Image (spheres, rainbow, N blue to C red):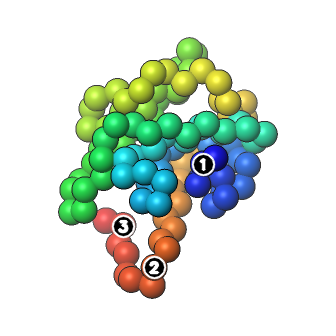
Amino acid sequence: MDNMAGAVGNQDRYGFNFNSSLSAEWRTNTGNGSSSSANDTGTSVSAGTWYKLRVVRTAAGVDYYINGSQVGSTVTKTLPDTALSFGFFVKTTTASARAVN
């Protein structure tokens, strides 16, 4: 269902991911350790373009933003119920060099 689950297991998480084999768009990913949801954002990924990705957790749920605009509706299901640490995960499917700046 979502490519991030295979990469990090069924862990509590909020985040964005991109997998060109699934979609040409940024996807949101929310998981609570036993289930997860992934949704296309409507924002296509373009090489050489900077994106400001933001995740906001509120009492109502989780909101995702790209470049200051909310994408999708507030996520209210599959929410993590434990404390989370900040981090990021980068995985490539080719031997080509990649950089995170």
Q: What kind of residue is marked 2?
A: Thr
Q: In this view of the protein, can residue 89 be seen by the observer? A: yes
**Left/right of residue 91 with respect to residue 48 in the rendered view:** right
Q: Which residue is mark 3?
A: 100
In whole angstroms, how far apart are the C-alphas of marks 3 and 1? 22 Å
Residue beneath disc 2: 94
Name the secondary structure under disc 3: loop
Q: Quadrant of residue 40?
A: top left
Of callouts 3 and 1, the N-terminal one: 1
Furthest toward the right, the residue is: 34
Of residue 37 and residue 21, the one placed in the foreground of this image is 21
- Which residue lies at the image location 51% right of the left edge and 43% below the top edge? 15
Query: Residue 77 at x, y = what percent?
Result: 65, 24
- Which residue lies under the disc numbered 1? 2
Q: Secondary structure at mark 2?
A: loop
Of discs 3 and 1, which sits in the foreground? 1
| Secondary structure type for disc 1 | loop
Q: Earlier in the sequence, mark 3 or mark 2?
A: 2
Q: Position of residue 17 (x, y in %)?
A: 47, 51
Q: Is residue 96 above or below residue 90?
A: below
Vertical placement of 90 versus 37: above or below?
A: below
The residue at 48%/71% (across/down) is 92
Residue density around tag 1, few if under 14, some if 14–19, many if 20 or more, within 10 Å? some
Q: How many marks?
A: 3
Marks 2 and 1: CB-CB under 8 Å?
A: no
Give residue 25's position: percent from left, percent from top.
37, 47
